[in-house]
Every structure is written in structure tokens, then in C-alpha cells.
Amino acid sequence: MTTLAKDDPVAVDECPDCLAGNLNWLLAQAHYALASELAGAFEPLGITPRGHSVLATAQTGSYTQKQLAELVGLDKTTMVVTLDELEAAGLAQRVMSPSDRRARVIEATRAGRRKVTQANEIAVRVQTEVLSSLGRDGGRALLQNLVDLVQHRLADPAACKSVRRREPRAS
């Protein structure tokens, strides 16, 4: 029996008819497993996958907090918490926008840029290991198909109140 997670008693082979063809369920399970693996791999660095995404994206341009949240796919509350954590760790800073004195842009500090470089190496290693389980062509095909989905058919989420992009709060 293949268990999905330590705290989830449902096994993949117990539910093939109801979930094996369910794209949402499969992507959610893959996301959870990969996010957990990355979080564990990033722990020695003192950074989370979410923090890594924010810092790495901040390095690609001059973005306000709101713009950065939209690019990374975080709601504003989660972005504030993430930035507060990154600032407290000395990895990011909010600075005055050169084009709008009322706005602040997010910058990675020197330590933050080093952390992104280290995390990128780990992320590439983990991703390579995960995708290699699909064979050379299978891993590439999966990545390309996912890129196509998120750039085209799934580029814009449907308006829906019940789905949120932030992580659930710890109990």
C-alpha cells in the first residue's frame, strides 16, 4: 500500500477509480510531495520554498509588494508575512521606489542573493531527481506540458470564492 502522507490514511491503490484520473487531485498530491521535499532540503538554509520564490522573483526586476505577490501567486496577507520573515532574517528589504515615492519595492539583500543561489542549486538537484523518475524524455515532456497549461489554458484562474492561494494556518 502506498500512503500519500504520514497523516493521510488514503492509499493511491485504494482509490484508483475515483481519483486516478482526477487531474486536480494528482497535481495537488504531486505539489504537496514536492513542496515537502523542497522544504526539507531548504531547511539547512533557513529558507522556505515560498521565501525562495519571492526572493528569486524579486531579483528579476523592481517590483512592489503587490506586483511581487501577483507574480509569485500569493495573496497579500501571505506576502506580508513572507516579507516580514525575509526581512527579519536579513534576506530582503523594502526600499523606496525610484519611480514612485509612495511605493516600496522589494529587494533581495546580498545575503538574500547568496541564499537564492544556494537554494537554486538545491531546487535543481531535487527537480532533476524527481523528473529523472519519468525517464529523460518523460521529465522534459511533463515540464513542457505544465508550462503550456499555465501559460495558456490555466493562465487565469476562474473567479471562485472557495479557492485560496495561501497555505493553511498551523493549528
Image (spheres, rainbow, N blue to C red):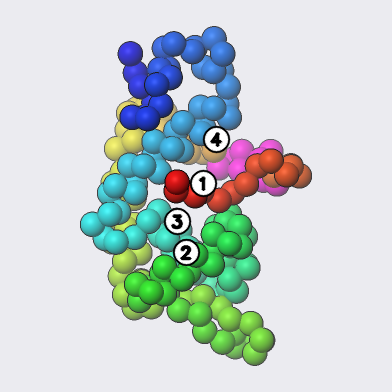
Judged by depth in the image, the label closer to the viewer, 4 or 2, is 2
Mark toward the start of the polypeptide (1 vs 2): 2
Pointers 2 and 3 in contact (CB under 8 A)? yes
Question: Within the magenta stretch, is there residue 153?
Answer: yes
Question: In the drawing, does residue 80 fall left or right of residue 8?
Answer: right
Give the distance between the C-alpha atoms of the residues marked 4 and 2, in whole angstroms: 30 Å
In the rendered structure, the answer to whether residue 77 lies left or right of residue 131 reads: right
- Kind of residue at disc 2: Thr
Question: Which label was assigned to residue 50?
Answer: 3
- At 37% from the left and 30% from the top, the residue drawn is 7
Distance between the alpha carbons at the discs numbered 1 and 3 = 13 Å
Earlier in the chain: of badge 1 and badge 3, it is 3
| Spatial separation of the CA atoms under disc 1 and disc 2 | 14 Å
Q: Nearer the viewer, mark 1 or mark 2?
A: 1
User: In this figure, which residue is indicated by the disc labeled 1?
Assistant: 168
Mark 1: which amino acid? Answer: Pro
